[in-house]
Amino acid sequence: MTLSDDLDVFFSDSSAVSATAGSTTGKGHLDEPTNVAVGDQVLFVDYAFRCKTSDFGSLKSGDAITINSVAYTVRMAEKEDDGLTTVLSVQKT
């Protein structure tokens, strides 16, 4: 059995939250804010949402996504390692 056969296992535990973008609903893991700073100034605060690429891999900067009933805007989408998972950098709308 390959990792892709069992990918749902990573997103079905109790720490996974529901997300919806357009007509697509899936689960993922939302990490608390990360500050992006230059010198002593914080430019923005992002949350990171790790999800299946097959669910939300087509999202791009500016797209809307609702995670755990909270509205967010995608700042950046980056596929991980093998491309099966994606990390969305999102900010609250």
Image: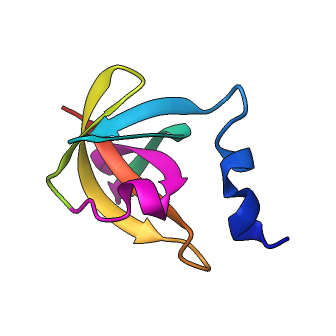
* Residue at the image position 71 percent from the left and 25 percent from the top: 14
Magenta span: 37-60
Is residue 44 shown in magenta? Answer: yes
* Residue at the image position 14 percent from the left and 53 percent from the top: 62
Quadrant in the picture for residue 23: top left
Against 7, is 65 above or below? Answer: above
* Residue at the image position 56 percent from the left and 70 percent from the top: 84
In the image, residue 45 lies at what x, y percent?
34, 42
* Residue at the image position 51 percent from the left and 52 percent from the top: 51
In the image, residue 74 lies at what x, y percent?
25, 50
Is 90 or 59 nearer to us in this picture? Answer: 59
Q: Is residue 40 visible?
A: no
Against 47, is 57 above or below? Answer: below
Against 75, is 32 above or below? Answer: above
Q: How is the image coloured?
A: rainbow
Q: How many marks?
A: 0
Quarter of the figure with the N terminus: bottom right
- Whether residue 2 sits left or right of residue 15 in the image: it is right
Is residue 30 shown in magenta? Answer: no
In the image, residue 30 lies at what x, y percent?
52, 38
Quarter of the figure with the C terminus: top left
Q: Residue furthest right?
A: 1
Is 31 or 25 nearer to us in this picture? Answer: 25
Q: Residue furthest bottom?
A: 82
- Whether residue 89 sits left or right of residue 12 in the image: it is left
Quadrant in the picture for residue 92: top left
Quadrant in the picture for residue 75: bottom left
Q: Is residue 76 visible?
A: yes
Q: Residue furthest left?
A: 62
